[in-house]
Image (cartoon, rainbow, N blue to C red):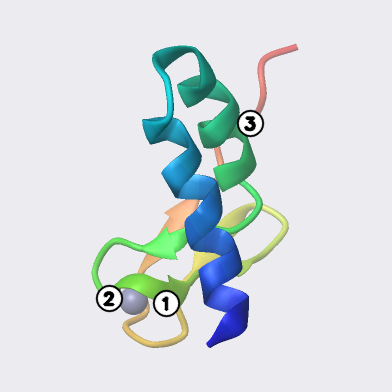
Amino acid sequence: MTAIHKFYELVEEKGKGKEKAKAGWKLERKRKTCPRCGAGVFLAEHKDRYACGKCGYTEFIKAKKS
Ligand SMILES: [Zn+2]
């Protein structure tokens, strides 16, 4: 799937250099993968949580400190 490969590129960036690691992780928030199903299964994004439609895993988004 071409779409998934696009997301993998973002992860690979953190391996290029220690200084670029943080930038790579920032991009990762764009789409989270399911820790149960593994890479390739993305979590659906909701207002306050991420949910996996495959296994039902739910990850709540912490409120930002401001
Ligand atoms: Zn899952």
The secondary structure type at the circle numbered 1 is strand
Cβ at disc 2 under 8 Å from ligand 1: yes
Specify the quadrant that holds the C terminus.
Answer: top right
Verify CB contact (< 8 Å) between mark 1 and mark 3.
no
Verify CB contact (< 8 Å) between mark 2 and mark 1.
yes
Cβ at disc 1 under 8 Å from ligand 1: yes
Give the residue at mark 3.
63
Q: Which mark is residue 37?
A: 2
Give the residue at mark 1.
41
Q: Position of residue 53 (x, y in %)?
A: 47, 85
Q: Position of residue 40 (x, y in %)?
A: 41, 75
Q: Nearer the viewer, residue 35 or 1?
A: 1
The quarter of the displayed image where residue 47 is located = bottom right
Task: Identify the residue at image location x=28%, y=61%.
Answer: 35
The quarter of the displayed image where residue 61 is located = top right
Q: Position of residue 62 (x, y in %)?
A: 55, 35
The secondary structure type at the circle numbered 3 is loop
Q: Amino acid at mark 3?
A: Ala
Question: How far apart are the two marked residues, 3 and 2, measured between alpha carbons?
Answer: 25 Å
Residue 59 drawn above or below residue 11: below
Task: Identify the residue at image location x=45%, y=47%.
Answer: 11
Q: Nearer the viewer, residue 25 or 57?
A: 25
Q: Nearer the viewer, residue 35 or 12?
A: 12
Q: Nearer the viewer, mark 3 or mark 2?
A: 2
Left or right side of 48 for 1 = left
Q: Residue furthest front?
A: 16
Crowd class of label 2 (few under 14; some 14 to 19; many from 20; radius 10 Å): some
Residue 26 drawn above or below residue 32: above
Residue 8 drawn above or below residue 18: below
